[in-house]
Amino acid sequence: MATTGRVTLPIEQGMDDQLPGILSRLGADAVRNSDGTWLPEITPQLGVKVYETYFPARGNQEFALAHLDARPRFNLMSERVTAPSAEPLAIDIMKGYYTLQVEPDQGDYQRWWEVIDRTTGEVVPVEGWSVKGEGSDVTVTIAEPVAFHVYTVSFLSWQVWDSTQMYNYTTNNWENDPTRMREIGYDVRHPEAWEFMTSSLRTWCEERPEVNVVRFTTFFYHFTLVFNDLGKEKYVDWFGYSASVSPLAMDAFEAEYGYKRRAEDFIDEDYYDNSFRVPSKVFRDWIDFQSRFVCARVKELVDIVHEFDKEALMFLGDTWMGTEPYGKYFAETGMDGVVGSVGSAATCRMISDIPGVKYTEGRFLPYFFPDVFKPGGDPLGEANESWLQARRAISRKPLDRIGYGGYLSLAVQFPDFMARIEQIANEFRSIHEVGHGHLAERSTIRIGMLNAWGELRSWQTHMVAHALWYKQIYSYLGVLESLAGLPFDLQFVSFEDALNGRLDDLDVVLNVGAAGTAFSGGDTWLDPELQGVLRRFVGNGGGLIGIGEPTAVLKGGAYFQLSDVLGVDKELGFSQSTDRYPVETHEHFITGDLKGALDVGEGAGDIFATTTDTAILRLQNRSDELAANQAGEGRGVYIAGLPYSHDNARLLHRAIYWAAGREADFDHQWIPSNPGVEVAVFEQAGKALVMNNLTEAASTTLTGRTSGLEGDGEIRELQLDLEPMESRWIDLA
């Protein structure tokens, strides 16, 4: 088995004597620096590939300070303030914001700022308000407010401290290091900034012949990350475009699209066009506009890198807006690879499934930062958790490479952790070696995730700040997490795609999320044509799985517009006088491996069967948590929520087979009897990877065909006893 390759390790100065031994032990064939560290002089002598971090839009304070008009900007909104009378109302627009990070941009404020009466939604005319103060001390006064109406100020602001560098600065206590400074960024739209970016990159490449890979971290526009007046995160949206604004960009947009973007188009009533909102045409236009511009500029930088025979690698994070890897323009950049932070199976697939690049790389957790690598920290526990999540996804669609970030000097103080990542590296390499470069076999059942975003946000639904846990999303994000390690080819389909015939290529469609969100669909479901497309799809033999509040919008006496297909609806209080007599069905294919109660997370609450033909598979407090329904030639399945767990992943696996009408095929799919164990079948290699996803020993029975998932192979049954977290290769025949 290979013991070298496919691993990138962060290195730093001051460890020359240790580095060769560590690299040999881990089998690392590439090294990199991190934000705030520098490659040691010994690097060219290590005999490995060299990555170096590069920041096109920050890092040179001399240029930044000399061109303060080139700083990036935010669109922000003040706090909501109630007018206590009709007397002039003064609003401190920076209240609640961190003055070291943002500062109001008062240039042409009458054009770019807006004062809005939030009670009526009306914009207060420019002549009705005035601005006083400078710097971070700015007040907007409304001359004649309506008493007891609520007002806000939407304002353009400078970014005076780069958001990511601020995070690294505070996390690593750089305030105690006199060599560190708070970095200012610069906007690529500014002509002098762009000239500086291209010329400095060329110089940088010339001066570093030993560097093989330019690791762009990342490009031009940071996701929306705003801090409060205590220096803590105030607003985080990993998909947010509110920091991609400038007068130059907005003028160019107006010239191309024929209409002006208002401040409110970005503020969006304080929701900032986050990905949970059903995207407006205006927001879609902005994403397309910025993505075309950014990707075109990125291509120019990539071309410079290639002139020096170096590879260009993009970090999927930080200033990544406009380089959405599943967007229309990313492949045109010529980027060689993408590296991203792996916080779950879903984020792993988000990286490994990216089309149009030569390789993908996952940066595993934990980062070698002092928030974990300190007395009382548990880096070993975090490493195990991260690997068990990622391994499920890697077994289905492997990353090409893995690595870590941060400070190696911290990690080596934890020998158990170092031993574990050595094991992880070898286990990762084995998937590539034994699988002979082939993907694990997938079921022939074709499934699609139906929402407003479609392909653009593949493997990114229900995320707020990457893989962080949020109460409002974990019951839905678990669907993606489950699918990331299941043997299905998942497509992401927009409502527009559905109207254009895309469902013809699918067997089962999933609609997942809370009412009103982009993922459930909101008012989109008021379209009779869309409803008709889904009903026809199911009526002709397809399957629909709804989770949470699918197809939800109140109209025509139904809340779930496809309640007739799903067999359930949600009680809003309007029909509670109707008597219902729910009866639970205790035996069903979908619940065949479910022992005890079903975990639906937060649940959707007050779900009832719309017909006596609906099979209620789990009933809790007289609310249907799981239901199955025959609809024409097809089938509907309803689940009130699906946080990730081994049991829930198995439940979803079964639900897909039942919805597709293929339950008879399930038993011979190399499905372990223990849901805590999963199997990836590499039929071309004649082998299967059995993975114990538990931190305790597990026993399981496997039944499958010697030919793989399907075919006419002999049925074989195995009994296996597995160590905690063990993975084991077995022969199919």
Image (spheres, helix red, strand yellow):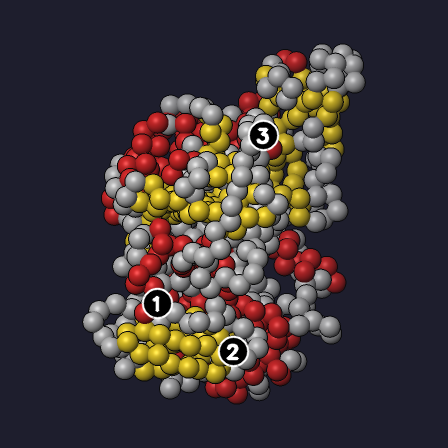
Q: Amino acid at mark 3?
A: Gln
Q: Amino acid at mark 2?
A: Ala
Is 258 left, or right, of 234 in this rendering? left
Tag 1 secondary structure: helix
Q: Is residue 158 above or below residue 314?
A: above
- Residue 379 rendering spot, x and y as whole percentages: 63, 73
The answer to which image quadrant residue 5 occupies is bottom left
Question: CA gap, disc 2 to disc 3?
Answer: 47 Å
Question: CA gap, disc 1 to disc 2?
Answer: 20 Å
Viewer can see residue 11: yes
CB under 8 Å between discs 2 and 3 = no
Q: Nearer the viewer, residue 159 or 233?
A: 233
Tag 3 secondary structure: loop
Kindly identify which residue carries mark 3.
576
Is 725 left, or right, of 81 in this rendering? left
Mark nearest the camera among 3 and 1 is 3
Quarter of the C terminus within the rendering: bottom left
Kindly identify which residue carries mark 1.
667
Q: Is residue 379 above or below residue 78?
A: below
